Image (cartoon, rainbow, N blue to C red):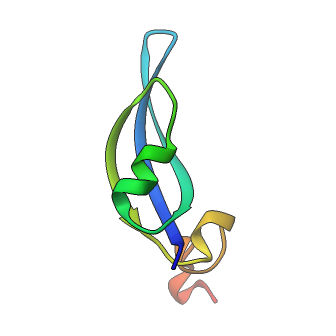
Amino acid sequence: MRVWFEVRVRDYINGRDIKKSKFYRANSPSEAAKCYKGPGHIMSVTKVGKERPFGIGEFFKLGDEL
């Protein structure tokens, strides 16, 4: 069963380190890491909920603000 994985990468753009998150649907963390084809270095791969890639739900917690 394919689930969402967040692949954290460090890209070198114009001589600067920039950390980015890429989201892929895969069966395992290693398969998600293979989906990334960019020039950067993969720092970590973690399983995330289905709301996080779209920027809703658990990713943006408001806590007591509501």
In x, y percent, where is residue 40?
Answer: 42, 28
In x, y percent, where is residue 48?
Answer: 46, 72
| Occupied quadrant, residue 32 | bottom left
In x, y percent, where is residue 52?
Answer: 58, 70
Judged left or right of residue 33, residue 51 is right
Q: Residue furthest top?
A: 15
Q: Nearer the viewer, residue 14 or 43?
A: 43
Q: Residue furthest left?
A: 43
Q: Nearer the viewer, residue 54 or 34?
A: 34
For the point 57% across and 79% down, which residue is it? 62
Q: Nearer the viewer, residue 30 or 7?
A: 30
For the point 45% across and 69% down, which residue is it? 27
Relative to 41, say whether 63 is above or below. below
| Occupied quadrant, residue 9 | top left
Judged left or right of residue 30, residue 36 is right
| Occupied quadrant, residue 23 | bottom right
In x, y percent, where is residue 36?
Answer: 49, 41
Q: Nearer the viewer, residue 60 or 37?
A: 37
- Count of labels shown? 0
